[in-house]
Image (tube, grey):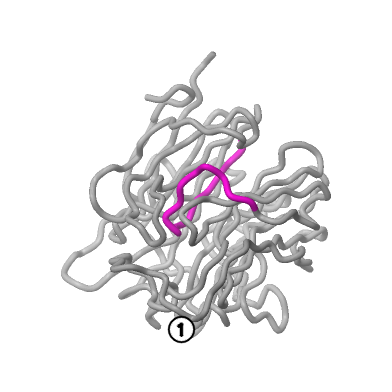
Amino acid sequence: MGKYFIKEKKELIFSVDGSKPYSCHASNICSMKNGNVIAAWFAGEKEGSDDVAIWSSIRENFQWSTPVKTAYDKAEPHWNPVFYQKETGELLLFYKVGRKISEWYTNIKISGDYGKTFSGSRKLVPDDVGGRGPVRCKVITLSDGSMLAGNSTETGIWTAYADRSADGGKTWSLSNPIVIDVEYHGENTAKDSDIAVSEQSFYGRGVIQPTLWESKEGHVHMLLRSSEGRLYRSDSSDFGQSWCKAYATKLPNNNSGIDVAKCKDGLLVLCMNPVAENWGKRSPLVLLVSTDNGATWEEEMVLESQPGEYSYPSVIAVGEQVHVTYTYDRKSIAYWRFRRKEV
């Protein structure tokens, strides 16, 4: 039990037959307007293999449905699903397709029945190369009604952006590039890492996969995964259209995914691996909180501490609850639900 939250639930979304190769990763969770939650992830023989598809499951009537293959457009790796539900109730599913991360593109599918069925796929942005819209973390709705997605590219010097839509996702506009001062000359940046990522991921330096929150009208912030052993941050004062240069925080980072959610009273909840090593181990996995808009953080709870890979969290705040999913040693997707303590 932490200072701010009580654990209500921990469960695995599914179990896997260990007799055949299988790897799952990069989950995303969304609370839908009918009261159910839906999670998606990519899975196949191994990350980056041509059989990797997008799978999803719905938590309804206190249990998770049998996972279904939700997107598999062609025999190429699929990556990083992200949900977003519009005020109309339409549920958008964004995801990446492509063998090369530097050349993948973003497809979108739409559900009108709370994730039970989806439309055919289309490119989010015509002629997309490199991936538009959300790269991994959730899309947030800003106080002006626009949608804002954390975006990044992984070619040489990794570079982040924010991708903004003011028309409900019909068109998107990229911000200025968000970078840090690093040099890269084509070398492999991993040192004896056994992390089960696609080999191409071990090349490049910089910042990627922003997670976003809005502190007050028009003032938006991002935390960024980095290759430098620390999380970086950038800030915007114009609804995410332009951003300051990324700067280092005191938070450790192992070059693995993070996610932050803002509660209705302004409390920030961050899930991450507190490991200050590029391509370092992906355990433990902890929950941190901040009461000062991310200036300082304190540990709220340890979610996993055993050896293995417990990574790539997805975090949402809904009323008095916080929901979290993450990679459970590449064998399943773990789900936690927390309830806010009464004060």
Residue 237 shows up from this direction: yes
Q: Residue at x 45, y 44 (%)?
A: 324
**Image: magenta residue range:** 247-262
Residue 299 or residue 115, whichever sits in front: 299
Label 1 SS: loop
Q: Which of the 4 image quarters holds residue 215? A: top right
Residue 181 image-quadrant placement? bottom right
Quadrant in the picture for the C terminus: top right
Q: Nearer the viewer, residue 199 or 89?
A: 199
Residue drawn at the location 71% of the way across and 42% of the way down: 214
The kind of residue on which mark 1 rests is Glu
**In percent of the image, x 60 and y 56: which residue is there?**
210
User: Which residue position holds label 1?
Assistant: 76
The correct choice, above or below, for 235 with respect to 294 in the image is below
- Number of callouts in the render? 1
Q: Position of residue 205 (x, y in %)?
A: 52, 68
Is residue 255 a member of the stretch shown in magenta?
yes
The answer to which image quadrant residue 296 occupies is top right
Tell me: 204 left or right of 308: right
Tell me if 316 is positioned left or right of 253 in this view.
right
